[in-house]
């Protein structure tokens, strides 16, 4: 049996992409160390008019690592990073890698409750965040030792000093200034075993779970992306426009690690603003733009998109959520460039498949597996029978980028990882050429503008409202966000409330993107004979109504 019959996607590999490679077994810190030696004086970041070179980035990361060590932080300790895109993020991340500490990404838009759940599950000893988020941290129930505070203006051009912070907080710039490099220890890293990042995602119960990504997982995925893109990447010359957040796994690997590996200048935008994006295209002429469908839809509808310089971008890439075919076609017609779509998940360190550059185009597919990555489709019932071409089943992934497991959740780990395969929970199919297509999500997860929303989490919060008897949450199609959240609510006998009051209640307890844009009060929810709410029946009925 030929390798092409076992892995038909290899026939569609671009000529420069190797089917297999030998991946580094070193600390992720080595990526910055190499970049600083090769591109010392090249800007690593551009941020509100100010630049930080790779040499300066390494120097500040080393000094911060020295201060972390002086505080008593040691290999294996968890440190939370609750920052938007700003130079302080890579400084902090690589400082943690230098010491073998475990970075824990935390979404800055979280509520105190959500922050507490993630931070306490990880058991963070320190949190690095912005001055404007201190009240959020204080309102949480985190049992941490060190609160380290910075501000957006500190790394912008002629920024004002740090705003007032609590007396117990440690100031980010002072830790860097006081960092004594002579105290930095040599830390041995076992790349295949030592965790570099806890990246939280949802569980089957909707509760977050931390994917344990090792140095090897993340380094391998960085190299897989580098090999795939090497033909049209000129190391030390590229410019990446990053509105995709670093705290997301997509931004972490493609935005931070890959850009450092390639010596790419990263233009950082801390919060999505389509006008800011347009101005960045005009001012910097980026050559690479990784994004999610929402961003491409925003650009398509902006009056200046056609004249802002999109034609200068060599690589447009979309991930995190399905990209409508009509958006691909319209954007490519407007920009004159190819918009590539891929597939990945937190548990695969980001990229598992993507679109080849020169192979036959198959719009609507998630492309083909990257180097050293195998896909298979198995039956939905047992997950043990491998299915053939065109048959729909659960997508499974195997490769060096697949996580070690879930933090302190052996049952979830055993369910997801079986015999070396990651069971994704996505229903997919493969065609005769080895291109894969996502049919639907096996799980009930909703993706809003590339961000994951788990119905059971919302339902749990809704149930705490004194007027709510029952609730069921589904995702409904949205032309801009991909999906939006809708809640069906049954009120308690004699109770009353309004849509606006419920939304206000949820906004106090959930990140904004999770709050349902639609709430419908219903007399009862459809249920099975054993009393299970028939979520799919609600979803199918809603989709049918929207066709009218």
Image: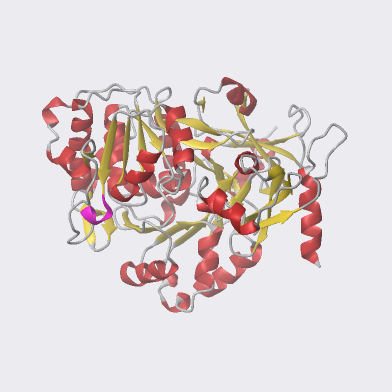
Which of 385 and 174 lies nearest the eye of the viewer? Answer: 174
What residue appears at the point 71 percent right and 45 percent down from the top-left corner? Answer: 472
The residue range painted magenta reads 151-155
What residue appears at the point 38 percent right and 26 percent down from the top-left corner? Answer: 191
State the quadrant of the C terminus.
bottom right
Q: Residue 329 vs residue 183: left or right?
A: right
Q: Is residue 152 magenta?
A: yes
Residue 404: where, in percent of width, then height?
Answer: 50, 26
What residue appears at the point 41 percent right and 37 percent down from the top-left corner? Answer: 140
Residue farthest along the right direction in this orientation: 529
State the quadrant of the N terminus.
top right
Q: Residue 328 vs residue 239: left or right?
A: right
Query: In the image, is residue 214 above or below residue 394?
Result: above
Residue 517: where, in percent of width, then height?
Answer: 62, 58
Which of 306 and 435 lies nearest the eye of the viewer? Answer: 306
Query: In the image, is residue 234 above or below residue 381?
Result: below
């Amino acid at each position: 049996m030929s390798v092409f019959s076992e892995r038909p996607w290899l026939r569609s590999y671009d000529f420069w992409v190797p089917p297999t490679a030998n991946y580094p077994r070193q600390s992720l810190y080595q990526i910055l160390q190499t970049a600083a030696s090769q591109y010392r004086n090249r800007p690593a970041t551009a941020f509100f008019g100010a630049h930080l070179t790779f040499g300066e980035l390494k120097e500040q990361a080393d000094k911060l690592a020295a201060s972390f060590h002086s505080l008593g932080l040691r290999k294996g300790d968890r440190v939370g990073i609750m920052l938007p895109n700003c130079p302080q993020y890579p400084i902090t991340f690589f400082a943690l890698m230098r010491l073998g500490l475990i970075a824990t990404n935390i979404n800055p838009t979280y509520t105190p409750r959500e922050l507490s759940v993630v931070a306490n599950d990880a058991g963070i000893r320190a949190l690095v965040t912005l001055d404007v988020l201190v009240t959020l941290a204080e309102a949480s129930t985190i049992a941490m030792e060190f609160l380290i505070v910075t501000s957006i203006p500190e790394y912008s051009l002629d920024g004002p000093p740090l705003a007032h912070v609590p007396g117990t907080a440690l100031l980010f710039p002072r830790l860097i200034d006081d960092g004594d490099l002579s105290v930095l220890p040599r830390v041995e890293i076992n790349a295949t075993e030592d965790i570099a990042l806890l990246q939280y995602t949802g569980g089957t119960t909707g509760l977050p779970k931390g994917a344990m990504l090792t140095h090897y997982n993340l380094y391998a995925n960085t190299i897989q992306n580098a090999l795939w893109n090497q033909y049209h990447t000129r190391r030390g010359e590229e410019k990446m426009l990053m509105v995709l957040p670093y705290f997301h796994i997509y931004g972490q690997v493609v935005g931070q690690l890959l850009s450092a590996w390639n010596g790419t200048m990263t233009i950082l935008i801390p919060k999505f603003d389509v006008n800011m994006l347009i101005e960045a295209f005009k001012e910097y002429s980026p050559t690479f733009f990784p994004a999610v469908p929402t961003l491409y839809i925003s650009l398509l509808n902006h009056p200046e998109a056609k004249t802002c310089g999109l034609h200068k971008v060599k690589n447009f890439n979309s991930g995190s959520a399905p990209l409508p075919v009509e958006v691909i076609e319209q954007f490519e017609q407007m920009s004159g460039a190819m918009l590539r779509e891929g597939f990945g998940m937190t548990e695969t360190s980001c990229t598992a498949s993507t679109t080849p550059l020169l192979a036959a185009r198959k719009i609507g597919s998630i492309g083909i597996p990257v180097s050293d990555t195998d896909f298979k489709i198995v039956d939905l019932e047992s997950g043990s029978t491998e299915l053939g071409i065109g048959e729909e089943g659960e997508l499974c992934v195997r490769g060096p980028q697949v996580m070690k497991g879930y933090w302190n959740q052996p049952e979830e780990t055993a369910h997801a990882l079986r015999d070396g395969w990651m069971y994704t929970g996505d229903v997919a199919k493969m065609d005769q050429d080895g291109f894969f297509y996502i049919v639907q999500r096996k799980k009930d997860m909703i993706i809003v503008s590339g961000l994951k929303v788990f119905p059971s989490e919302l339902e749990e919060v809704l149930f705490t409202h004194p007027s709510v008897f029952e609730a069921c949450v589904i995702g409904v199609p949205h032309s801009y966000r991909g999906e939006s959240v809708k809640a069906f609510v049954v009120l308690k006998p004699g109770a009353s409330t309004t849509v606006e009051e419920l939304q206000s209640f949820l906004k106090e307890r959930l990140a904004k993107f999770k709050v349902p844009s639609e709430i419908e009060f219903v007399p009862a929810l459809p249920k099975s004979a054993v009393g299970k709410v028939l979520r799919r029946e609600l979803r199918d009925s809603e989709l049918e109504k929207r066709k009218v």
